[in-house]
Structure formats: C-alpha cells, structure tokens
Image: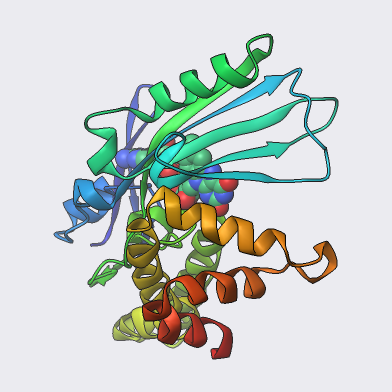
Amino acid sequence: VAGVKYEYRGEQKELRSKIVIAADGVESRVGRWAGIKTHTDFRDMESCVQITAAEIPVDPNTCYFYFGEEYAPKGYFWIFPKANGAANIGLGVSGLIGKKHSAQTFLNHFMEKKYPNSTTLTQIAGGVPSTLTLKNIFAPGILLAGDAAHQVNPLSGGGIHTGMIGGSIAGEVAADSILADKPDYIFNYDKLWYERVGKRHEIYNRLKDGIYNFDDKKFNSIAHAFNKIPPEKRSLGNLFKTALIHNPSLLIDVAKVFLMK
Ligand SMILES: Cc1cc2nc3c(=O)[nH]c(=O)nc-3n(C[C@H](O)[C@H](O)[C@H](O)COP(=O)(O)OP(=O)(O)OC[C@H]3O[C@@H](n4cnc5c(N)ncnc54)[C@H](O)[C@@H]3O)c2cc1C
C-alpha cells in the first residue's frame, strides 16, 4: 500500500503516503482492497437503531437499560436522557435475532407502548461488530483502526472510546515508523493494541456469550437480588457479583475483568 485514490467533489485524486490508516468503519472496504479479511459473521454483527426523541418523561440523571425477550433478545435496550425532556432511545440485537425480527420493530413496539405521544427528532441505524478484534489489523503500509479493525467492546457494543484508543495507537506507531525510517515497525500495532485493550475484549466476549444465554427468569432474579443492595452500594462490580451467584460459571471471567489493570 502506497497511498489512496479518491474522489473529491467529482474529481479523481491520488495521494501517495508511506502508511495508510483505514478508519472506514465496519466491513472496511479499504482494508479489503489491501487484502485484509474484514468480514463480520452476521451472528456477531449487532443490528442497532437509535432515535433522539422529545417529550420523554424520564429522570434526567438516570440511564435506563432493558434486557430480555420483549425488549432486546441477545442484546440490550437503552434510554440515555438528554436536556429538555429529550432522550436517545435505542437497542442492539444479535444478527441472529435481527434476521427474523428487526431492531426497528422492537423500537417501534417500545415507543408505541411507552411513549406514544413523543416526537422523533433524528434516527440512526447500523451494524456494530460485537466480537473480537480482527486477526490481522495491519499489512505492509496499512493499519486498520476503529470499527474497521473490530475494536468495539464486544460486551457493550460501544466502539467510540475504544476506536479512539485504536486510532491513537495506530497514529503513534505510524509516526514512529516513519521517523525511524523502519517500515516494519508498524507490525507492532496489534501487540500494542492487544496489551492496551484487546486482551480485555477477549474476556468481555466470553462474558457476552454467557450473558446472551440468560433467559428472562435469570435476568429477573438478578434484578430482584440487585434491588436489595442499597442504592449507594450499587456498582458495576456488585452487579456482576450478583449475576455470579446466579451463574457461577462466569466466575473466572468476571474475576479477570476486575483484577486486570
Ligand atoms: C445505533 C448505534 C448506536 C451506537 N451507540 C454507541 C454508543 O452509545 N457508544 C459507543 O461507544 N458506540 C456506539 N455505537 C458504535 C459506534 O457508533 C461505532 O463503534 C463508532 O462510530 C466507530 O467509529 P469509526 O470511526 O471506527 O467508524 P465510523 O463511525 O463508521 O466512521 C467511518 C467513516 O468512514 C467513512 N468511509 C467509509 N468508507 C469510506 C471510503 N471508501 N472513503 C472515504 N470514507 C469512507 C464513512 O462514511 C464514515 O464516516 C453505536 C452504533 C450504532 C449503529
């Protein structure tokens, strides 16, 4: 890879560079053009949709999450309050579910049931690769970053923060490689990513697989047990501890999450 050809305002252009960083999103075509496999199995592709809606009467200081068959099987549903009674409301479901019952259908059902008088202001939808980082995130002269490299947290489906970390590591590695005039230096990218974030994602991915198999009964019993914890003591750690009592097989992975730095 020695640069990119692109179109700008109808004009064909060419830009030569020592290193290209492909941050072109899920299923990265730029990566594929360089011979890297960027495909996502549909079972790992969370199908996500989110609206920003007005007139949503929720506590502005609380983020709401819904789990279970009715709201988001093999995924979760969220309400993130914004200012002036608006909120971001959305969900992600596994591609396995989305194939039969789209994320949009779940959202419509929820809005009709809970907030029939709200107004939708904006809407976004897309696939989120909720899986492990790609096996290859570089090739000679090219590095992949963000969704293009599958740097999304597989448990939460959040890829903004982790994509920024991946992008910053890619940028540093590229700069160091050019400054030292060592093209091979970029091959350190995957090790640096793995140490900083990637190894955690392996554990999150296993936790996701465990949690995906929870049925509604299990979610309800965890929620009821968690409700007994005084509000000031409720934390993510305590939530996982409660979940563990109900599913001891997750013990090792949960312990690793909280012990790893
Ligand atoms: C509904 C929904 C809600 C989400 N909510 C959250 C959330 O709350 N928190 C969170 O952390 N993450 C969330 N995510 C995931 C998050 O959006 C992504 O992980 C993140 O945007 C990835 O950033 P990126 O820059 O790698 O890729 P992208 O945001 O996909 O950006 C890639 C860019 O490259 C451009 N591009 C593609 N191909 C080319 C080409 N050939 N030439 C030039 N440009 C090209 C695209 O137009 C795009 O602008 C959500 C995703 C969805 C779908």
Q: Is residue 186 above or below residue 65?
A: below
Q: Is residue 161 visible?
A: yes
The answer to whether 136 is drawn above or below residue 112 in the figure is below
Q: Position of residue 10 (x, y in %)?
A: 36, 21
- Is residue 74 found left or right of 234 in the rendered image? left
Q: Nearest the camera: 9 or 38?
A: 38
Q: Residue at x 43, y 59 (%)?
A: 152
Residue 101, given in percent of the width and then of the height, sits at 29, 28
Identify which residue, 25 or 228, lies in the foreground: 228
Is 82 or 65 nearer to us in this picture? 65
Residue at x 83%, y 38% (from the top left corner): 60
Q: Is residue 48 left or right of residue 168?
A: left
Residue lying at 28% horizontally and 49% vertically, measured from the top left: 28
Quadrant containing the C terminus is: bottom right
Residue 178 in sight = no
Q: Quadrant of the N terminus?
A: bottom left
Tell which of 80 and 245 is nearer to you.
Answer: 245
Protein image colouring: rainbow
- Residue 14, by quadrant, is top left
Q: Position of residue 105 (x, y in %)?
A: 39, 22
Q: Which residue lies most toward the left here?
A: 35
Q: Position of residue 186 (x, y in %)?
A: 35, 79
Tally the numbered discs: 0
